[in-house]
Image (cartoon, helix red, strand yellow):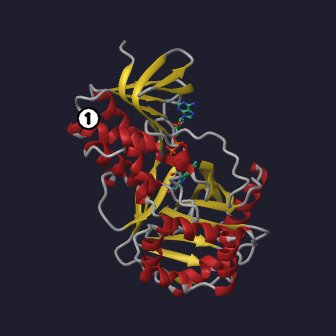
Amino acid sequence: MDRQYDYILGGGGTAGLTLALLMAKDSFFFDKRILIIDPQPKNTNDRTFCFWKNDIFPLEEIIYKKWDKLSFIDEKGQELDLELGDYTYNMIRGIDFYNHINPILKKAPHIDQVQAKIIQINEIGETVEVQTAQEKYFGRYFFKSYYDKINLSNYNSTIQHFKGYIIETEEGFFDPERSTLMDFSIPQEDDTRFFYVLPLSPTKALVEIAIFSNEIATNDEYDCWLKDYITNDLGIQKFTIEEEELGQIPMTDYPFKNHDTSQIIHIGTGGGNVKPSSGYAFMRIQKHIYKIVECLKFGDDPVNAKRIFSSKFKWYDRIFLNVILKNRVKGAAVFSAMFHRTPAKHIFEFLDEETTFLKDLNVIYTQKKWPFIKAVFDELF
Ligand SMILES: Cc1cc2nc3c(=O)[nH]c(=O)nc-3n(C[C@H](O)[C@H](O)[C@H](O)COP(=O)(O)OP(=O)(O)OC[C@H]3O[C@@H](n4cnc5c(N)ncnc54)[C@H](O)[C@@H]3O)c2cc1C
């Protein structure tokens, strides 16, 4: 087998498969050789992607559930009916994502897949040498989406960790048209924590707790919080757990792009695609990958694709993290002020980094000024 490739994709998860799908479909890549290396077969429902959007997008056909009504519940238990405009909230199941993309890749003659773990990468001149336990491969570009442990202690950093159940109730309990984006009406401990409830039918919903904290909860703790919320807050006495989801996502202002070279480009979580102030990553990964493909096609350096993440929003994220990590304002209070005082459609546009400075002010002015000004000075000096 000729082990020389134009593009090697290290990791075939969300970012790797998104890139591979575009390379499978776009005729620009038909005369290129592409290799995906991943130790996992990607045949389990290992995650659920939820995201808002206000446009048709290429993975429309695998959206599992869409909601056009969303609630937000503040710390005092007040429920807001969010003004979404043309936004919807959407869910894609990991298994549907993998099962949609992998068969397309198998049929693409210019794409090879290898199930192996990469143990080392080296840059030799204009080539990247990629070593698995069994073989060595060579590529012009290497897109790396597996995530190495990084020391984040000198940065504003926390971890969004979460556990969720898909539960089934005996009687119809949920409104499948409406989901709860965030419910902060639970004890906040010393961190930021909320539940979300995403109904799939009148008798089925994903109920999940998310916590921003460097102290990861134990399984028993998650189970205790989830069962307490389902029985006491939602008032459901009888339910069965159909599936579980567990995960951790870094929320940090660490400059991931410094790891990139002219040949090794980091994508996905390790490419800094997680929005530091919200933990949402799925749509940012899509945007980054589309931009990479555009760069490759039009002769621009794919490293430059990260320019879509502007320094203005990086700065906002940094200030947000400073405020909540230094406990200047509770995270729950920051989100509540935002959703009470600005229509959700503006907040989504802001979090998607699509707003002008004037529009940013709509969101910025929802917050208490002094804690944020102190955070700005803290970051400057
Ligand atoms: C449970 C869970 C739920 C999430 N839900 C949401 C959500 O609702 N909305 C949202 O916006 N974001 C969500 N995220 C965050 C983010 O969208 C996902 O983590 C996303 O999968 C990140 O994509 P990725 O390609 O960086 O990583 P992954 O999808 O994890 O892919 C990395 C791949 O690298 C492979 N790999 C690992 N080590 C090696 C190695 N040495 N050599 C080769 N390959 C290797 C892995 O097997 C894996 O397939 C969630 C994350 C998790 C974990």
Q: Nearer the viewer, residue 167 or 289?
A: 289
Asked whether, in this view, residue 153 is left or right of residue 301, the answer is: right
Using residue 325 as the reference point, say whether residue 299 is left or right of it.
left
Residue 185 vertical position relative to residue 147 in the rendered view, above or below = below
Q: Is residue 235 visible?
A: no
Counting the numbered discs, the total is 1
Residue 280, x across and y down, in percent? 52, 59
Secondary structure type for disc 1:
helix
Mark 1 surroundings within 10 Å by alpha-carbon count, few (fewer than 14), some (14 through 19), many (20 or more): some
Rendered-image quadrant of the C terminus? bottom right
In this view, the residue farthest toward the top is 1
* Residue that label 1 marks: 29
Identity of the residue drawn at 41% across and 44% down: 97
Quarter of the figure that contains the N terminus: top left
With respect to residue 293, does 253 lie above or below? below
Nearer the observer, 35 or 234: 35
Q: Residue furthest left?
A: 27
Q: Quadrant of residue 106?
A: top left
Along the viewing direction, whichever of 269 and 380 lies nearer the viewer = 380
Q: Whole-percent x and y of residue 125?
A: 44, 26
**At 44% across and 74% down in the image, what residue appears?**
69
Label 1 within 8 A of ligand 1 by Cβ: no
Residue 327 visible here? yes
The image position of residue 293, as x and y in percent, is 32, 45
Q: Residue at x 28, y 36 (%)?
A: 24
Query: Where residue 189 appears, x then y in whole percent?
Result: 79, 69
Amino acid type of the residue that numbered disc 1 sits on in the rendered structure: Phe
